[in-house]
Image: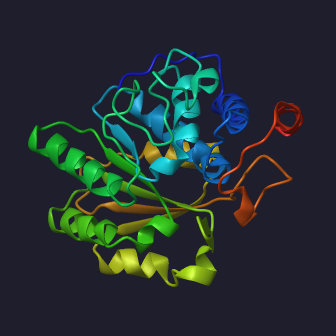
Amino acid sequence: MTAVLENDTSLEARAAEARRLVVDMAASPRGCHLGGSLSVLDILIAALHRASRGDGTEVVLSKGHAAAGLYAALHVSGILPENPAPLYGQAGHPFTGHPGPKVPGVLFPTGSLGHGVPYAAGWALSERLSGRNGLGIAVAGDGELQEGLVWEACQVAAAQRLGNFVLVVDRNGGQNDGMVEDISPLPHLAERFVSFGFNIARVDGHNLAALTALFDEDRRDADRPLAVIADTVKGKGLPPVEGKAGSHYVTIDAPRAAKWKRMIR
């Protein structure tokens, strides 16, 4: 993954602009997964910043329904040249509701929940076998952890001692049908990952400095994969929808989009 980054643009400025682009996509005729796209944006921007080193690191958005957030992050990071917002959901363009490899910066198609985690683990293994130092970074949702494939991939990653595999959980507490706590809770999540042979980190998923420092850690000698529990807010940056399960999928009109974009700082 190669990025053309503008050095004079801070990650915070990129994140704010990306959130405005996501709101624009929510104002498209089809709408978008607004809440999860906004919760995961800071994680994606920090992870893409890590990948910009050009060392073979690959970022896989396993929660592919947050494609609007990924497209926005790719654009503000300089990886995706064209603005995806005006083309989102339009026939003949690759900016669909789930991302695929026709989009610059997207190596694997994701959307079926859980599948991006083994993709990223497989990438990490390929990097190690090739004698390179790139990371395989999977970004998953907390609701997505209900998929058995996630834990199967974690078991393999630990068995292979993939220290260059990083699984980031966007823990916003929500999923399609409501709140994770009301559907299939995840108690003792850190301990679960430890039992699978992972090292653990916990971070504010909207603190770009903390996220960047975490991704920048040297993992060349690590022999245990890393699970990052990133505490986030569904709909982050938009007070009218922050923390609300109803922000999962949203279609809005242009006046509301303009109003919401003015709230983003």
Colouring scheme, one of rainbow, by chain, secondary structure, one colour: rainbow
Q: Is residue 164 visible?
A: no
Count of number-bearing discs: 0
Q: Is residue 87 visible?
A: yes
Q: Eyeballing the image, is 104 above or below 179?
A: above
Instruction: Give the residue displayed 36% in from the left and 67% down from the top.
Output: 199
Instruction: Give the residue displayed 25% in from the left and 46% down from the top.
Output: 220
Q: Measuring from the top left, give residue 137's x and y in whole percent.
A: 37, 48
Q: Measuring from the top left, give residue 95's x and y in whole percent.
A: 49, 30
Instruction: Give the residue displayed 40% in from the left and 59% down from the top.
Output: 113
Please name whichever residue, 38 or 27, is drawn nearer the observer in this view of the structure. Answer: 27
Q: Is residue 63 left or right of residue 120?
A: right
**In which quarter of the view is residue 32 placed?**
top right
Q: Is residue 126 left or right of residue 99?
A: left
Instruction: Give the residue displayed 22% in from the left and 60% down from the top.
Output: 223
**In which quarter of the view is residue 87 placed?**
top right
Q: Measuring from the top left, give residue 8's x and y in whole percent.
A: 64, 16
Quadrant where the N terminus sits is top left
Q: Eyeballing the image, is 201 above or below 10?
A: below
